[in-house]
Image (tube, rainbow, N blue to C red):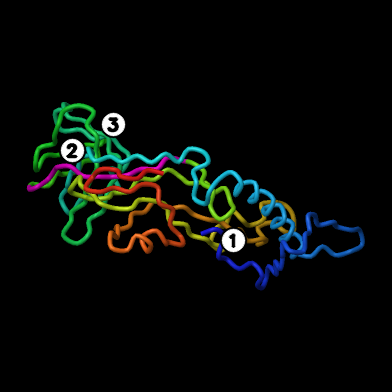
């Protein structure tokens, strides 16, 4: 994963930059048209300089700023009845009818197949919500109903803090994310890390790229596209029979390896 896989030497970008030419600056001249290719290559030349510094200091996939990873095998799952919507409770504080039991909802899972909507919680007071009881979002009148059977127990999640990682020569922002490893057990076995996704974004996808110069003839007109790398927290199964293949992912940065709920590798 040392280099980006997106090809910029295509229509309409025509970025045919080659470092073997040794060009260090693009020198614009009066009376000569500015080529879109020249503006794109200017970025590539500058990017090449910064990536060389990065490669001298960091290995590909290294955390540069923040990006701490936390494994939590003490999180509690709380199943709701099938008619409830899990996302309604995401990030809220819930309580029982007596206000004696309160919990922070860390993340949620929507209903999938036979699995009901599920909340993953940390208790602030009390130790359990009763089966079939009503929960309320603190400070609101929004309620939900706890499932009647196998409604609570231990689960396992992993989180990554906001940070910057060195990826394919770029310093890429990672937004804070939480991923459920096992919904209803706390003995997961996975490789945990970040998948990398390259994309070129145009204004038909992101309207904030339209020209914001209100009052001019170019207002709201489309312009340049943008290149981005998105980092997404992900889990992958381990392979004890083929350790080479297990580490050969071209778009995956392994941050943590967990076996039966215990971390065995942390990068």
Classed neighbour count for the residue bearing mark 1: other residues with Cα under 10 Å, few (<14), some (14–19), many (≥20): some
Check if residue 155 falls in the magenta segment.
Answer: yes
Q: Secondary structure at mark 3?
A: loop
User: From which residue to which does the magenta span run?
Assistant: 149-162
- Tell me the CA gap for discs 3 and 2: 12 Å
216 relative to 10 in the view: left or right: right
Q: Which residue is mark 1?
A: 203
Quadrant showing the C terminus: top left
Horizontal and vertical percent for residue 198?
52, 61
Q: How many marks?
A: 3
Horizontal and vertical percent for residue 44?
69, 57
Whether residue 85 is visible, yes or no, is: no
Dot placed on the residue nearer the N-terminal end, 1 or 3: 3
Residue 139, disc: 3
- Tell me the CA gap for discs 1 and 3: 39 Å
Horizontal and vertical percent for residue 179?
33, 48
Query: Which quarter of the picture shows residue 33?
Result: bottom right
Q: Residue at x 55, y 58 (%)?
A: 2
Check if residue 156 falls in the magenta segment.
Answer: yes
181, 1: nearer the viewer = 1
Image: 87 above or below 65: below
Residue 135, disc: 2
């Amino acid at each position: 994963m040392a280099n980006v896989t997106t090809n910029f030497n295509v229509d309409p970008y025509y970025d045919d930059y080659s470092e073997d030419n040794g060009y260090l600056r693009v020198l614009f001249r009066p009376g000569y048209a500015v080529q879109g290719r020249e503006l794109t290559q200017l970025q590539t030349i500058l990017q090449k300089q910064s990536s060389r510094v990065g490669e001298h200091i960091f290995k590909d996939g290294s955390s540069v700023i923040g990006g701490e990873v936390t494994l939590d095998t003490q999180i509690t799952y709380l199943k709701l009845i099938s008619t409830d919507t899990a996302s309604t409770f995401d990030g809220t504080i819930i309580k029982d009818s007596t206000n004696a039991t309160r919990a922070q909802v860390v993340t949620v899972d929507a209903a999938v197949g036979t699995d009901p909507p599920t909340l993953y919680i940390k208790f602030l007071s009390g130790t359990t919500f009763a089966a079939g009881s009503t929960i309320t979002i603190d400070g609101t009148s929004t309620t939900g109903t706890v499932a009647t059977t196998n409604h609570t127990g231990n689960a396992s999640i992993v989180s990554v803090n906001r940070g910057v990682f060195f990826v394919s020569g770029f310093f890429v922002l990672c937004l804070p994310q939480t991923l459920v490893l096992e919904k209803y057990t706390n003995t997961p076995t996975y490789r945990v890390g970040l998948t990398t996704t390259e994309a070129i974004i145009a204004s038909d996808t992101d309207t904030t790229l339209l020209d914001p110069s209100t009052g001019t003839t170019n207002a709201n007109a489309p312009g340049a596209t943008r290149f981005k790398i998105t980092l997404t927290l992900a889990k992958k199964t381990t392979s004890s029979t083929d350790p080479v293949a297990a580490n050969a992912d071209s778009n995956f940065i392994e941050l943590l390896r967990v076996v039966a709920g215990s971390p065995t590798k942390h990068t």
